[in-house]
């Protein structure tokens, strides 16, 4: 019997992780639901051999935002043209070039043919379809507007992909300058300065302390370059391990938010993603507490996640979204003010859309 790894929330909002034997994913979900857990994610545990193979071929299994956007557009177009869901999934699977996605789409199609709902079939593939996607599809099935929900998700992922692409392009030039600057300084210190040392020694000049320091640094780099490379790799691996821990990630995320320029960029990016994701969930008629749970999943910064958990708890007590956001001082004042106005006037969705559009332009 396969073993599944899972991450859930209990009734008090505490995140729990564990493993469980189950005949299939549906049985796993049923067991967790019976125990009163809110499922965040789950996946079948790989064997040691499978784990190594997954690591070696992880690039081929990576699902991009563009992949999900294209899949959603294809689904929307075909369903809107009158094709059945099973036929649509079969056509899309045959047209997909990535073998990993082809297998996923075929599996989803088989599950739907067996009588499983589309959203439940998607839920079995959390690495491809996010909770946001599954929730929107489930809302579309209940409301009989699946094609409209798919259109909204297609637009959402398309916009997310465009923003990510623009940010990456904007980072190329400064990263190029940094690499060139570091390379030039390294070349000067390790190759050019030693030649000057010979000249200084021949002339018997008394050189200032700053020049002596650079010459000593040059000798150290030339004599210990291999050790420095090994030490650098070791520090990098230690940093990776540290950021995987809960306390480590929280501390690093706090530093990121407080860093000049980068902190402002992260704040604006998070505000845009928060507003855009919440707006699309609210428009789907999904309960506000579920909306906030899903929004928390799409935010990567653990400091902001902690704030969102507090927001969910206070909303569960009947309070507004704006109040805990204001107390956290994470998001800009404009975000808090517009959400407060949206809640008071019943136009929260419209205000969230305006917030996301504004901060996407800012980013």
Image: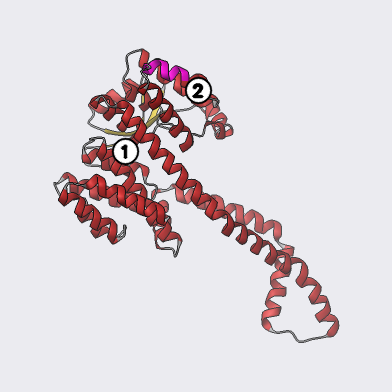
The answer to whether residue 14 of the structure is visible from this angle is no
- Type of secondary structure dominating the magenta stretch: helix
Q: Nearer the viewer, mark 2 or mark 1?
A: 2
Q: Quadrant of the C terminus?
A: bottom left
Mark 2: few/some/many CA within 10 Å (<14, 14-19, 20+): some
Residue 103, disc: none
Residue 277, by quadrant, is top left
Instruction: Give the percent coordinates (x, y) of residue 138.
Output: 29, 28
In the rendering, at what x and y percent does residue 111 appear?
38, 17
Dot 1: few (<14), some (14–19), or many (≥20) neighbours within 10 Å?
A: some
- Secondary structure under tag 1 reads strand
**Magenta region, residue range:** 84-91
Answer yes or no: is residue 136 visible.
yes
Q: Residue furthest front?
A: 81
CA distance for labels 2 and 1: 32 Å
How many numbered discs, if any?
Answer: 2
Q: Secondary structure at mark 2?
A: helix
Drawn side of residue 140 relative to residue 224, left or right: left
| Rendering coords of residue 298 (x, y %) | 37, 43
User: In the rendered view, does 92 fall on the left or right side of 318?
Assistant: right
Q: Residue furthest top?
A: 114
Q: In the image, what residue occupies the spot 25% across and 40% down?
A: 282
For label 2, the residue is 102
* First in residue order: circle 2 vs circle 1: 1
Q: Is residue 327 above or below residue 98?
A: below
State the residue position of label 1. Answer: 16
Q: Quadrant of the N terminus?
A: top left
Could you tell me which residue is drawn at 23 percent across and 49 percent down?
Answer: 311
Q: Residue at x 31, y 52 (%)?
A: 355
Asked which quadrant contains residue 230, the reply is bottom right
Q: Is residue 149 rendered to the left or right of residue 68?
A: left
Q: Is residue 99 magenta?
A: no
């Amino acid at each position: 019997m396969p073993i599944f790894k899972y991450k859930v929330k209990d009734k008090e909002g505490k995140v729990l992780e564990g493993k469980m034997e189950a005949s299939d994913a549906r049985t796993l979900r049923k067991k967790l639901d019976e125990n009163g857990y809110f499922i965040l994610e789950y996946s079948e545990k790989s064997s040691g051999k499978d784990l190594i193979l997954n690591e070696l071929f992880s690039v081929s299994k990576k699902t991009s935002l563009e992949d999900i956007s294209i899949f959603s557009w294809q689904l929307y177009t075909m369903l809107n043209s009158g094709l059945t869901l099973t036929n649509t999934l079969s056509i899309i699977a045959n047209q997909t070039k990535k073998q990993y996605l082809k297998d996923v789409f075929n599996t989803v199609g088989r599950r739907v043919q067996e009588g499983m709902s589309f959203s439940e079939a998607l839920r079995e593939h959390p690495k491809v379809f996010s909770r946001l996607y599954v929730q929107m599809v489930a809302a579309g099935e209940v409301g009989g507007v699946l094609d409209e929900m798919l259109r909204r998700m297609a637009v959402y992922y398309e916009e997310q992909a465009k923003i990510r692409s623009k940010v990456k392009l904007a980072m190329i030039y400064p990263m190029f300058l940094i690499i060139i600057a570091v390379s030039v300084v390294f070349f000067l210190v390790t190759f050019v300065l030693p030649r000057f040392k010979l000249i200084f020694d021949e002339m018997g000049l008394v050189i200032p302390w700053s020049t002596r320091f650079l010459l000593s640094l040059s000798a150290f780099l030339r004599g210990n370059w291999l050790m420095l490379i090994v030490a650098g790799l070791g520090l990098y691996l230690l940093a990776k391990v540290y950021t995987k821990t809960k306390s480590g990630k929280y501390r690093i995320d706090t530093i990121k938010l407080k860093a000049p320029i980068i902190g402002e960029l992260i704040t604006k990016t998070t505000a845009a993603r928060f507003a855009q994701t919440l707006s699309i969930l609210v428009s789907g008629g999904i309960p506000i507490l579920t909306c906030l749970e899903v929004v928390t999943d799409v935010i990567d910064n653990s400091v902001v996640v902690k704030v969102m958990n507090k927001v969910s708890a206070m909303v569960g007590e009947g309070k507004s979204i704006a109040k805990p956001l204001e107390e956290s001082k994470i998001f800009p004042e404009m975000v808090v003010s517009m959400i407060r106005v949206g809640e008071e006037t019943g136009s929260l969705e419209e205000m969230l859309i305006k917030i996301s559009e504004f901060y996407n332009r800012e980013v």
